[in-house]
């Protein structure tokens, strides 16, 4: 009776049945296939390269898109997402040069807390936070996932998405109330997003958390798609809405400088 004891990893992979491998193993193979040269790749190509059934590949890709590790590209192709790009940069020698400097310059210019977040499907995820020169500390933490409709970064991202995609997001998540100021109807949100597009930045005026006031702007990829955003955060009892909106030019300059780095 023959065995495969002497077979190498490639032979083992080629001989796997459709059910072989744990969910984690399948996910890692799919990530490898998506990140392979020549992308973005078709679903059939990812399925074949990962040796995972098409239905499982589609389901795992949907989860990876939601987490920001994969992007759904035009013509039903799949490419590397912003979180995977950042992870690659960190493993390869640290954060892409310039990100920390740009964020710190914004913090010094405004004196307020600065956040960098990535767009992860139905939420944003904070990946950097620089505390401002103020006698308070905000409760946000790196790794925290936040809603799109209540945050300045989230609304700036929504403003750059197609209307149909925004409707789908609203249908999937609803517009749950977090404070008395949260926008909880689709009409109110779409009206606000039109204002964001006209002004180039969004405002969170106690919509996500009481006493917290923020402005945020999206970071766009070369195709004009939002991959994340930056916010300037303060408290309502120290900084007025007019004062924080005056930081918008510095904020937008920071997001434009960060775009090539993410």
Image (spheres, rainbow, N blue to C red):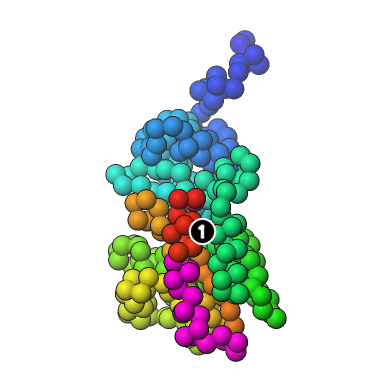
Disc 1: which residue:
118
Between 80 and 231, the one lying in front of the other is 231
Query: In this rendering, does residue 155 appear at all?
Result: no
Q: Residue at x 66, y 16 (%)?
A: 5
Residue 116 at what x, y percent from top left? 55, 62
Q: Residue at x 55, y 67 (%)?
A: 106
Is 219 rendered above or below residue 191?
above
Q: Residue at x 37, y 50 (%)?
A: 222
Are there few (<14), some (14-19), or many (20+) residues within 10 Å of tag 1?
many
Residue 143 at what x, y percent from top left? 62, 60
Q: Secondary structure at mark 1?
A: strand
Please state if 229 lies on the left or on the right of 101 as rendered: left
Between 44 and 87, the one lying in front of the other is 87
Please check the rendered image and state whether residue 115 is part of the magenta-colored stretch, yes or no. no
> Toward which corner of the image does residue 169 lie, by quadrant?
bottom left
Is 27 rendered above or below residue 203?
above
Q: Residue at x 35, y 81 (%)?
A: 188
Query: In this rendering, does residue 86 appear at all?
Result: yes
Please check the rendered image and state whether residue 243 is part of the magenta-colored stretch, yes or no. yes
Q: What is the tally of numbered marks visible in this picture?
A: 1
Quarter of the image with the N terminus is top right
Magenta stretch bounds: 236-252
Is 183 rendered above or below residue 162?
below
Residue 197 at what x, y percent from top left? 33, 71
């Amino acid at each position: 009776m023959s065995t495969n004891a002497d077979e190498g990893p490639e032979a083992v992979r080629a001989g796997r049945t459709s059910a072989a491998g744990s969910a984690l193993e399948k996910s890692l193979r799919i990530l490898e296939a998506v990140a392979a040269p020549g992308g973005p790749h078709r679903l059939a190509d990812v399925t074949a390269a990962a040796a995972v059934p098409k239905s499982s590949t589609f389901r795992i890709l949907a989860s990876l898109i939601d987490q920001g590790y994969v992007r759904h590209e035009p013509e039903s192709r799949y490419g590397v997402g912003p979180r995977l790009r950042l992870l690659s940069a960190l493993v390869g020698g640290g954060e892409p040069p310039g990100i920390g400097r740009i964020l710190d310059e914004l913090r010094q210019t405004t004196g307020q807390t600065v956040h960098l977040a990535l767009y992860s499907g139905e939420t944003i995820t904070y990946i950097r936070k620089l505390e401002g020169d103020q006698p308070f500390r905000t409760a946000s933490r790196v790794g925290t996932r936040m809603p799109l409709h209540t945050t300045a970064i989230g609304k700036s991202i929504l403003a750059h998405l197609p209307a149909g995609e925004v409707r789908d997001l609203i249908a999937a998540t609803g517009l749950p109330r977090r404070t008395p100021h949260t926008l909880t109807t689709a009409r109110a949100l779409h009206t606000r997003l039109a204002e964001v597009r006209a002004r180039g930045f969004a405002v969170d005026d106690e919509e996500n958390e009481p006493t917290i006031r923020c402005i945020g702007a999206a970071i766009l990829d070369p195709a004009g798609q939002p991959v994340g955003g930056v916010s300037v955060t303060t408290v309502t009892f120290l900084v007025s809405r007019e004062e924080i909106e005056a930081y918008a030019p510095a904020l937008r300059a920071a997001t434009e400088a960060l775009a090539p780095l993410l």
